[in-house]
Image (cartoon, coloured by chain):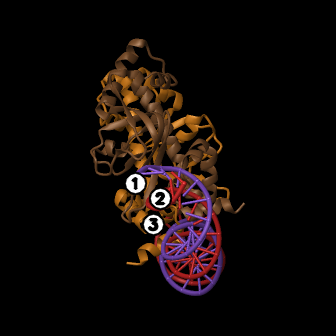
Chain colours: A brown, B orange, C red, D purple
Amino acid sequence: MNELRKHIEEVTSITDEEFDYIKTFFTEKKVKKHQYLLQDGDKVSLEYWIIKGIFRAFYIDKEGKEHIVQFALENWWLSDYNAFFNEKESGINIVCMEDAEVLCLTLSGREQLAAELHKMEHFFRMKLTKGYSAQQCRIISLLSNNPKKRYEEFASLYPNIMQKIPKKYIAEYLGVSRETLSRLYSNY
Amino acid sequence: MNELRKHIEEVTSITDEEFDYIKTFFTEKKVKKHQYLLQDGDKVSLEYWIIKGIFRAFYIDKEGKEHIVQFALENWWLSDYNAFFNEKESGINIVCMEDAEVLCLTLSGREQLAAELHKMEHFFRMKLTKGYSAQQCRIISLLSNNPKKRYEEFASLYPNIMQKIPKKYIAEYLGVSRETLSRLYSNY
DNA sequence: TGGAATCATTGACTTGGGTTAAGAAAAGTT
DNA sequence: AACTTTTCTTAACCCAAGTCAATGATTCCA
């Protein structure tokens, strides 16, 4: 839990008492590679903060193709906020790609935390602002860059993800076929 | 300003005194068609809430092509949150497409409001959650749908935007050439 | 340690959508 | 009302990237 405190204090400082209270909302969980945290159609009731490990969140289209919404590793938050906000079942899947430990927070727990502790409301807003901003960059990149540029951008933005996961998932993230991605870096 | 109060109270109820205070952070502004609210390279210091009118926020790539990040009309919030979060100059442009009235809030004003009034912090978080969720839908659509599907999705999601703005901008939003878009609905 | 999955590469072929161009229609302006 | 400017449509052509298929390379696991 100590990592979580450090993580929160990057945004706002909290007292020992406050953190003791915050802690009570989280439960620890160990997750093995290939294990699902969330499956298409599930009721979404949890949000996860990753202590260690790697996950991918993906959407499956009507043809059965996977499209990666988000990768997540240490210190990242992860859930289907879309389902949460619209109070629907999940439309995406979240799978573990490298043995992991996560902290689980119920969505109602988060709202309660935010309501009771202004600092936590602030914290969540700041995290969301960052996520919003990152998503906007990705949209711009999808609209204006060709696959090669997108690949280079991704590689420079997330070098640590690049090394750790199969390239086919990067292709799915970039919106490109594995074959095309493969051709990109063989052309040097 | 009354519309603003109504807008805020959709999320959280506030007292007269609170609203009187909130009001002091906003200034009204009238904007004419074709007028810029924000230009690539500007220092981003304001956020806008639209009372009436239509705007588009767009990115210009190296070839000079426009790519639309966001449309915005009544009740929408608009700024370059990316620039704000990373404390950089704007990378996008915001242009008025239909005579408008907006309320301006400085970014530091927003932070102050959020810090002083927990309710406003909550309000901004809720708005951001909704925006985040919408962006995620758009990313999924860009990754998994072809132009025709994206067009249909957009048309059903934002029928009011469809009617009011030139189709070429919709093409720029969908990441498709005007010609391709034009072919889409002539094929029925 | 060897066989089975999974993942990556490469080549041949196909195709969706971009580009170019030219003309029609609509909107804005005087 | 006439002229300009912007927007839209349609057609011909082309190319980037997808698909299909076969082969190699890794990784996984019994």
- Amino acid bearing label 3: Asn
D24 sits left or right of A113 in the view? right
Quarter location, residue C18: bottom right
Q: Residue B146 carries which label?
A: 3
Identify residue for label 1.
A59
**Real-space CA distance between mark 3 and mark 1, rounded to the nearest whole angstrom:** 15 Å
Residue B54 seen by the camera: no
C10 sits left or right of B67 in the view? right
Q: Which residue is drawn at 66% across and 59% down?
A: A185
Q: Quadrant of the C terminus of chain B?
A: bottom left
- Residue B51 placement (x, y as % from top left): 41, 43
Q: Which residue is drawn at 52% across and 24% down?
A: A10
Question: What is the chain letter for disc 2?
Answer: B
Do tags 2 and 3 sit on the same chain?
A: yes
Q: Do the residues labelled 2 and 1 touch (CB within 8 Å)?
A: yes
Q: Residue at x 34, y 31 (%)?
A: A105
A24 sits left or right of B55 in the view? left
Question: What is the chain letter for disc 3?
Answer: B
Q: Quadrant of the N terminus of chain B?
A: top left
Do tags 3 and 1 sit on the same chain?
A: no
Q: Which of A170 and B96 is in front in this view?
A: A170
In the structure shown, which secondary structural element does the residue marked by tag 1 occupy? strand
